[in-house]
Amino acid sequence: MPGSDFDRPGLATRANLNIGLGHTFAFLKKDPLGDELTFAYTYENAGSHGFFHTGFGSHTESLGVMKNFDIPKTKAVSGYTWIQAGLTSLTGYPHVENRFYDGEALGAVIHFSRHSSSWIQESYNKIPTIPWYTTTGVGYTWSW
């Protein structure tokens, strides 16, 4: 899911590159938290150059649960919630700093075909020792 984040406060654009694996389980269909278990790796640039790579960044490995839901009267757009927890490694300091990561997201998916879609996501992110922050992400997804 290559995309861009708009971090707040402000609207600084940041590179956000994510690769994830998820699988929907039928027995979780009625679970209120989610029906899809996920693993994701995300790189986000945190330097002063915004979108382009700098020495400051975060590398996050997370496990999560996603709940996909249909939006009434449309087949082209669906929604999801995504709860994640994992480890973030902050680079650009004299040594790599590892921190616990907690993220909650709400998003919409615009389906172009069976395999191709675009997503828009609003996330609340918390890493201890760093003030919580929200991001708005947009990107493209190819699914098998």
Image (spheres, helix red, strand yellow):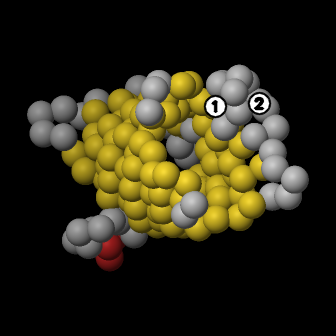
Horizontal side of residue 15 vs 56, given as left or right: left
Tell me the CA gap for discs 1 and 2: 8 Å
Q: How many marks?
A: 2
Residue drawn at (55%, 63%) of the image: 128
* Farthest bottom residue in view: 27
Residue 119 vs residue 16, the one in the foreground: 16
Tags 1 and 2 touching, CB below 8 Å:
yes
Q: Amino acid at mark 1?
A: Ala
Residue 44, position in %: x, y?
A: 65, 41
Circle number at residue 135:
none
- Residue at the spot of label 2: 53
Residue 143 vs residue 62, the one in the foreground: 62
Is 35 above or below relative to 2? below
Residue 17 is at least partly visible in this image: no
* Farthest left residue in view: 73
Horizontal side of residue 30 vs 116, given as left or right: left
Residue drawn at (65%, 59%) of the image: 88
Residue 11 is at least partly visible in this image: yes
Is 62 above or below relative to 105? below
At label 1, counting other C-alpha atoms closer than 10 Å, the crowd grade (few under 14, some 14-19, many 20 or more) is many
Q: First in sequence: mark 1 or mark 2?
A: 1
Residue 97 vs residue 114, the one in the foreground: 97
Answer with the quarter of the image where residue 62 lies: bottom right
Residue drawn at (45%, 34%) of the image: 8
Q: Amino acid at mark 2?
A: His
Horizontal side of residue 38 vs 109, given as left or right: right
Residue 90, position in %: x, y?
A: 72, 53
Circle number at residue 15:
1
At label 2, counting other C-alpha atoms closer than 10 Å, the crowd grade (few under 14, some 14-19, many 20 or more) is some
Residue 140, position in %: x, y?
A: 52, 30
Is 96 above or below relative to 143? below
